[in-house]
Amino acid sequence: MKIICIGRNYANHAKEMKAELPTEPVFFMKPDTALLKDEDFYIPNFTKDLHHEIELVLKINKAGKHIEEQFAHKYYNEIGLGIDFTARDIQATCKEKGLPWEKAKAFDNSAPIGKFISKETLNINKITFELKINGVSKQIGTSADLIFSFDKIISYVSQFVSLKVGDLIYTGTPEGVGQVNVGDKLQGFLNNELFLKLNVL
């Protein structure tokens, strides 16, 4: 099982990060040790600037590679909500030095995951999602604003990396990313339904 994360997939988020809009999907990986199903998250001691990134997550249900976009919808049947935690200070230092920045993204428990729902119950092109911290809305997104669709993501990634049953694809975060602190309580909503809860310790 692996975690595939798509970067810069919402135009407004790319702008807030002062990054160019991608012409093709940008992706990076997290190991399975990044996955967190518990409601308690401990901020690692190596960062002083940990940021939240709420994302829609696809669960792969069929193995495949070199998948054509027109058939990509057959390779996932559930959608959930997850957070891509980023040690922004570590990432910035790595970027300045031209180094890989996996240690800012792929550390243990950096990918909290909530519950999943059958995609058949959703309008794929109009899924709304939101992150609240201590009851205050911080990020709001909709699948309608994706630069690259779910099918495009699956097709593109599969040209480079074989997909296996159980793999997770984090599909990108909308604008509004920011710092989390000890004591924060995070809640993730999909179509106004609570899908994820997290206590920051």
Image (spheres, rainbow, N blue to C red):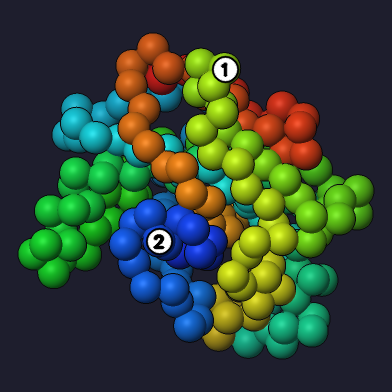
Q: Residue at x 44, y 73 (%)?
A: 21
Q: Is residue 187 above or below residue 164?
A: above
Whether residue 3 appears in this view of the structure is: no
Q: From the top left corner, tell me how far across and down residue 35 is, in percent.
A: 49, 41
**Pick the front one: 62 or 111:** 111
Q: From the top left corner, tell me how far across and down residue 32 is, in percent.
A: 46, 48
The quadrant where residue 22 appears: bottom left
Q: Residue at x 91, y 48 (%)?
A: 121
Q: Secondary structure at mark 2?
A: helix
The local crowd at label 1, few if under 14, some if 14 to 19, many if 20 or more residues have their Cα within 10 Å, is few
Q: Secondary structure at mark 1?
A: loop
The residue carrying mark 1 is 135
State the quadrant of the N terminus: bottom right
How far is disc 2 from disc 1 in space, using C-alphas?
A: 26 Å
Q: From the top left corner, tell me how far across and down residue 3 is, in percent.
A: 50, 56
The residue carrying mark 2 is 15
Tag 2: amino acid: Lys
